[in-house]
Amino acid sequence: MLDSGMLASGSYVKEYERRFSRFIGTKFGVATSSGTSALHVALLSLGIGRGDEVITTPFSFIATSNAILYCQARPVFADIDLDTFNISPLKIERALKAHPKAKALLIAHIFGLPCQMDEISKLVRRHRLKLIEDCAQATGAEWDGGKVGTFGDVAIFSFYATKNMITGEGGMVLTNDKKVEQRSRALINHGRSSRFIHATLGYNYRTTNIAASIGICQLRKIDRLNARRERNARYFSKRLFGIKGVVLPCKPETSKHVFHLYTLKVKGKRNQLIRHLAEEGIESASIYPIPIHKQPLYKRLGYGSLKLPKAEAAAREVVSIPVHPSLKESDLQKIVEAIRKWTLKRR
Ligand SMILES: *Cc1c(COP(=O)(O)O)cnc(C)c1O
């Protein structure tokens, strides 16, 4: 790629789009500069605009909900299930009762665990909603044998440096709908319909051949990388099982969890555990410590008095420990021992 001299968008991007969409199982892929720009374009290409209501999760990276704001549409938050950290189908149903005109549902498969796609698909059909899947944390995750990213009208992925598959910065819009693909392609390139013709308002959300060539190589490894994350997670789940006051991540039978993060719930002394692990040389974090509706921006937008008790409880209790593919068995051992030591100290 470097020898070709074509560093910006070109043939490597095309090849990456083809391979990645084939890997997930959709007809089309449009590579973007980031997961965030992919979200923006995905919503716009479904026709989401000023004043439209979009139901979404309060417990995600802020980009999920901010993309709705970019379209001058309004996020409607439905609370999560505390077991899965994912948006609750029951709460979506309740949100639809209060907001019957909602146009779309934007779900995020949080930490690598697929949402409850059976119930969500039923709701989407019954209420004729557009479904957008935020798969930024769930490349390769499966629900009932189908990869996430294949269940909605459009899906987005992120290849940011901390995700399961990485190109530094980068993202992708996936769809089976030719119109969504064409609109997305125009939107990422200043609304260009052909050379020198700009039919609509667009952006520069293109990615580069540099990122795409990294992506093509990453794609060869992603199954192996995810398998290592799953192996690390199994190690933790076996050895941390039964420790009082520590709740392990759930693993439903119908899904393949790709463990973007391995997230424990600890009531009360969560921050003490994070400090203890830091003293032992282990980096852990509460992700996310503030649900989206409690962020200063969203408080100013009028969401401050909204009560979403499960998302708020998750924000208080979560702690993610390292689970990435380059951990060695000795690292895993050290992490388990440090957590055990903390539980003894705590008594
Ligand atoms: C990372 C992430 C994004 C945004 O992706 P970027 O590539 O960082 O712009 C969106 N949604 C979720 C759930 C994410 O984790």
Image (cartoon, rainbow, N blue to C red):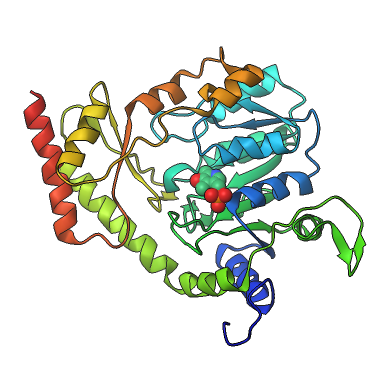
- Residue 281 appears anywhere in the view: yes
x and y, in percent, of residue 320 in the image: 32, 41
Q: Determine the image quadrant of residue 18.
A: bottom right
- Compared across the picture, whether 58 is left or right of 98 comes to left
Total number of numbered discs in the rendering? 0
Q: Determine the image quadrant of residue 82.
A: top left
Quadrant the N terminus occupies: bottom right
Q: Is residue 150 above or below residue 240?
A: below
- Residue 135 appears anywhere in the view: no
What residue is shown at x 34% (from left), y 39% (from top)?
250
x and y, in percent, of residue 97 in the image: 68, 19
Pick the front one: 82 or 189? 189
x and y, in percent, of residue 247 in the image: 26, 32
- Compared across the picture, whether 91 is left or right of 342 comes to right
- Compared across the picture, whether 64 is left or right of 125 comes to left
x and y, in percent, of residue 284 in the image: 28, 42
Q: Determine the image quadrant of residue 70.
A: top right
Pick the front one: 322 or 247? 322
Quadrant the C terminus occupies: top left
- Compared across the picture, whether 304 is left or right of 199 comes to left
- Toward the front, the furthest residue is 5
- Toward the top, the furthest residue is 305
What residue is shown at x 62% (from left), y 65% (from top)?
21
